Image (cartoon, grey):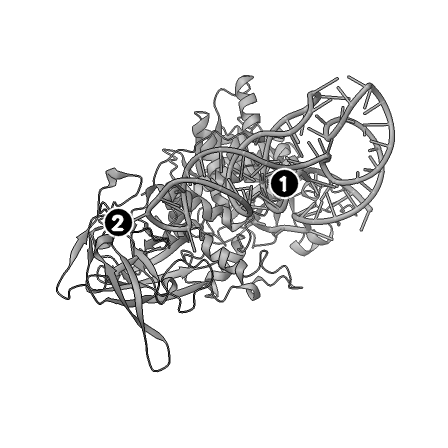
Amino acid sequence: MSDNESPALPATDFIRSIIRDDLASGKHQRLVTRFPPEPNGHLHIGHAKSIQLNFGTAEEFKGICFMRFDDTNPLKEEEEYVEGILQDVSWLGYDWGERLTYASDYFEQLYEFAEELITKGKAYVESQSAEEIRQTRGTLTEPGKNSPFRDRSVEENLTLFRQMRTGEFDDGTHVLRAKIDMASPNINMRDPVLYRIRKVPHQRTANQWCIYPLYDFTHGLSDAMEGVTHSLCTLEFEDHRPLYDWILAEVSAPCIPRQIEFSRLNLRYTVLSKRKLIQLVEEGHVGGWDDPRMLTLSGLRRRGYPASAVRLFCERIGISKSENNIDMSVLEDCAREVLDKTAPRVMGVLKPLKVVITNYPEDQTEEFQPARHPKNPEMGNRKVPFSREIYIDHDDFREDPPPNFFRLAPGKEVRLRYAYVIRCDEVIYDETGRVTELRCTYDPATRSGAKAEGRKVKGIIHWVSAKDSIQVEVRLYDRLFAKPIPGSDDPEGNFLNDINQDSIEVLSDCQVEPGIMTAENQEVFQFERVGYYYPDPVDSLADAMVFNRTVTLRDTWARLEQEQT
RNA sequence: UGGGGCGUAGCCAAGUGGUAAGGCAACGGGUUUUGAUCCCGUGAUUCGCAGGUUCGAUCCCUGCCGCCCCAGCCA
């Protein structure tokens, strides 16, 4: 399922430095981390960065990493996402072993910690409405006001909180608040809400609870209960760290984890926020979470990205605290790097142009046996039939070739890869003037592998035997958005206007060499000179294959030609 | 105008008092029956800006500028 190539060089970053120091100083005997997604959507490449940090460092430092679902909001979370998330993490190549947990596993202990806080006079039951709480919170520049319920007695708070638990109040009538400081310049410290009443069943605890803890109360304590030493999260939680520390300090926590923040991944020409991904899926702008244009892990997987390419990418971009905007080409290049070494080669003609080799006998065929991989002879050879009628790619022929075009043109010669040199003698057109066929002659003396190949020809093109080739559908993908930062030009930030209308092109009449049918496993192929293609795991049928273009090969000629014009 | 962060080459990113790692991209050259791959070579007199301390500052101090995050009973 996943290829387990380990990263080349050990990464060094500020978080690993802290871990290294804490282990060296004896502050911790063993590293414990956790990857804590909320099951309200599927994972994307930004999560891969976090997964690789948490699971990756655990592996590196011989520690452990918990796979923990942060499921404290039954209104937004769904069990179906759990399965997808677990599949994505294991696809990436990480194993949580026995350490699959849920914040909801700790609801009872969490409740006890809440009572402890109340008993210590550090939390109170608030009976103002949500609106009133908002009104009295103050603003960024003005302090908030104390709640009239702030000084309820411990006994009253305890009674009320227990009644909240037993369901005696309606949603929204009461909440539990920490008693910290309504004048704090950090808004998170202005008596944050710890528990709210929600009379809805929870995916895992069903109707056991009608009060649910909020993130700030849950997260640090869950970390502590799991013995997490380093709680790694993204920058937007930096402001929450004082609260994280406060809760752990005020309660008899089993240990004190340290929260460390790093910057989240931003990629150009795509969106990675869960909200936006959900919108793309729900409004039908894409085919689903696993649409190959989506930078979700399921989308990348379906597109043909090897897990090791995603890991290489995460390693390459590093970990820091600065805002970043990584170019999509970095990701693409990681795919090329991995695939070049592993993908079996095959010839595939995307836009077939028929070529008749007029001096090749009609009933003759022969078979070439090129290597499946130019540098890995152990991958063996394939059989490629050759005959009088072949297809070449339309892009490899020009009636009026530009300078330095060393492919086929009237009167010019090219080598058919692994086969012969041919010369274009005649161009056949249809009524509309479109080129429909080429008449060529071949030179038998130039047979591939022959001692004296006769002459050197600069151009080499791919081809397939017309009567032997397999027709397949190919889907060419491009970036989903036309702007580096979707929505940045729109006053309302509407990113949907920037969707690239040409992000998918379907070619239904592609011809590939018959050897592709021998593939037993789903694997990514390199269509020589063109790119990497992966059989679509959803729409591909045994007799009607569909290939997704994972990524093109680097195309120096395309760049050159663009510069020439 | 409150609080928390960030600012090192096109994009990432180390270094944190001793004279700017590395990767990707780009460019030049070589190999090549994939215009691919591979190989070799090239880039910051300078670390947001301005002062200061120091024999010496990207690193310490002061001031300024720019960008990001925070006012959910979301995570």
Q: Chain of mark 1?
A: A
Residue type at mark 1 is: Ser
Comparing A365 with A445, the one in front is: A445
Residue A405 image point, x, y percent: 43, 59
Residue type at mark 2 is: Glu
Binning the other alpha carbons within 10 Å of mark 2 as few (below 14), some (14 to 19) or many (20 upward) gives some
Instruction: Tell me the residue at 55%/19% (across/down).
Output: A27
Comparing A82 with A130, the one in front is: A82
Give the structural element (helix, strand or loop) at label 1: loop
- Tell me the quadrant of the picture where the C terminus of chain A can be found: bottom right
| Mark identifier at residue A424 | none
Number of residue marks: 2
- Tell me the quadrant of the picture where the N terminus of chain A can be found: top left
In the drawing, does residue A194 fall left or right of residue A513? right
Give the structural element (helix, strand or loop) at label 2: loop
Binning the other alpha carbons within 10 Å of mark 1 as few (below 14), some (14 to 19) or many (20 upward) gives few
**Residue A287 sits above or below residue B47 on the image:** below
Q: Is residue A297 visible?
A: yes
Of the two numbered discs 2 and 1 in the rendering, the one whose residue sits closer to the viewer: 2
| Mark identifier at residue A453 | 2
Instruction: Place residue A292 in its image quadrant.
Output: bottom left
Instruction: Tell me the residue at 40%/57% (across/down).
Output: A406
Residue A212 image point, x, y percent: 53, 46
Q: Which residue is mark 1?
A: A322
**Residue A231 sits above or below residue A347 on the image:** above
Residue A548 image point, x, y percent: 36, 57
Mark positioned earlier in the residue sequence (2 or 1):
1
Q: Is residue A540 visible?
A: no
Q: Are marks 2 and 1 in contact (CB under 8 Å)?
A: no
